Image (spheres, helix red, strand yellow):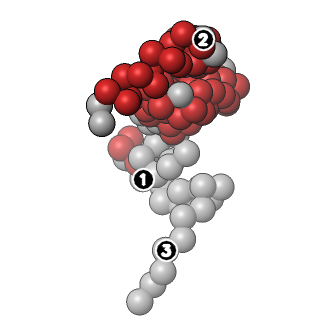
Amino acid sequence: MDHYQYDPESKNDNNSNNSNNSNNNNYNNNENTPERKDKIATASLVCGILVIPGTFTLWFGIIFGISAIALAIISRLNTGKFNGRAAAGITLGIVFVILSFMMYYFALKMLSNPDLLDFLNKYMESMK
């Protein structure tokens, strides 16, 4: 059994004038290959989607949001441009990180109010 190993440096030994043979064996031809998918941009979009429900858990919203922003920036550095997935990931990340910080701030402000704490204690006692 003969084993064929492709060598892009070798020339065609046949002296045929077949025009179909001219560029068909070149596996490194980048002209007709589809654009490769950027997995980091996809990960940024996934983190951007996960930040939406994570916003209501406070810390997960911040973690997923910062991850989405960082992955979109890394994708931009690797490819030289923001593609649609990275742009969506960074947009969702920025919006929901700001929203998470606002919710965290308002939660701390509300819980530091003594009148609100008294109201919550009375409400909890009335539930018994």
Most foreground residue, 74 or 128 = 128
Name the amino acid type tagged 2: Asn
Residue at x 54%, y 10% (from the top left corner): 115
* Real-space CA distance between mark 3 and mark 2, rounded to the nearest whole angstrom: 78 Å
Front position among marks 3 and 2:
2
Report x, y in % for residue 64.
55, 32
Instruction: Place residue 52 in its image quadrant.
Output: top left
Secondary structure beneath label 3: loop
Secondary structure beneath label 2: loop
The residue that label 2 is drawn on is 113
**In the figure, 27 relative to 52: above or below?**
below
Name the amino acid type tagged 1: Ser
**In the figure, 32 relative to 81: above or below?**
below
Q: Earlier in the sequence, mark 3 or mark 1?
A: 3
The residue that label 1 is drawn on is 16
Task: Give residue 4's mark.
Answer: 3
Name the amino acid type tagged 3: Tyr
Front position among marks 1 and 2:
2
Secondary structure beneath label 1: loop
Q: Earlier in the sequence, mark 3 or mark 2?
A: 3
Most foreground residue, 15 or 11 = 11
Report x, y in % for residue 44.
52, 30
Q: Is residue 14 visible?
A: yes
Residue at x 47%, y 31% (from the top left corner): 57
Say which quadrant the C terminus sits in: top left
Most foreground residue, 74 or 117 = 117
**Pointers 3 and 1 in contact (C-beta within 8 Å):** no
